[in-house]
Image (cartoon, rainbow, N blue to C red):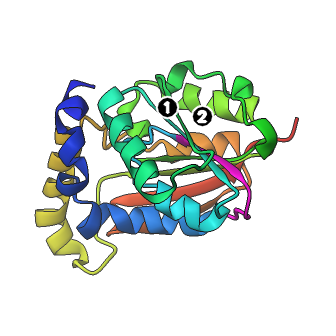
Amino acid sequence: MQKYTASARFYDLISAEWPVYRRGRAAGMALLDLTVGDTVVDLGCGTGLNFPWLWRQIGPSGRVIGIDRSPDMLAQAARRIARHRPGSADQLIRSDCADVDFAAIDTGEHGPVRAVVATYALSLMPDPHSVLQRVCAQLPDAAVLVVDMAQPVGRGPLGTALTRWVGAPLARAACRAGGADITARPWLHLHTLAPDHRDVEVCGGHIHACVGRSPSS
């Protein structure tokens, strides 16, 4: 968590969001089927880069609940909310995602949690399967979106050769710098927990998005 504490104020600028990771975020959000007024939980929300994408789908009456263990990242997320959605019902919770009691989250008059998103977060966690298992067990019939990273395989605009010699080393270096496990492939856990899922890859296979639905209670 220390590296995210140190970089929180500049994270949006140094995270390669615009040239690379925004594409995965866009692909993942396109898989969601949210409606105006929905409540969405953002696991490992960081500075709130998912928030604008979610706000467009859930509208002013919807609610985003961001969860992160870094107070400095949450401070940036709070500034984003204050700047773009002052007075909204959006909420931030400081917690390790592995410890969250999702069933106990108070959604008030906004109804049950309709979706949970985890973008570039589960590969940072020591046991992503247990986190997704907890989500699926405690939030029945919720859409679950995972967007995360893998070793690029060359399917994309760079072509196979350039991806192998340039893109792949850069991807590995970026994951090491951020503390992510590029081999984790956390969406595979969602495949086992939510058999009715949809997948898409972008950036030469470096980014994989998967959405499934937790089993009904």
Choose top left, top right, bottom left or bottom right for residue 46. top left
* 102 displayed left or right of 7: right
Residue type marked 2? Leu
Magenta-colored stretch includes residue 34: yes
Q: Amino acid at mark 1?
A: Pro
Q: Residue at x 57, y 39 (%)?
A: 189
Query: Along the horizontal axis of the image, is 68 left or right of 195?
Result: left
In the rendered view, would you say 66 is above or below 93? below
Asked if the residues shown at circle 2 and circle 1 are in contact, with their CB atoms under 8 angstroms apart, the answer is yes
The front one of 132 and 142 is 142
Q: Determine the residue positioned at 64% across, 49% down.
A: 63
Q: Which residue is mark 1?
A: 128
Residue 130: give x, y in percent of width and height: 57, 25
Foreground pick, 72 / 171: 72
Compared across the picture, whether 3 is left or right of 126 comes to: left
Indicate the quadrant where residue 113 lies: top right
State the extent of the magenta-drawn residues as a range. Answer: 33-42
Residue at the spot of label 2: 132
Q: Is residue 165 above or below residue 88?
A: below
Q: Residue at x 43, y 44 (%)?
A: 185
Residue at 74% over, 55% down: 196
Disc 2 element: helix
Q: Quadrant of the N terminus?
A: top left
Q: CA distance from mark 2 to mark 1?
A: 6 Å
Can see residue 111?
no
The single residue placed furthest to the right in the displayed view is: 217
Q: Is residue 73 magenta?
A: no
Dot 1 falls on a residue whose secondary structure is helix
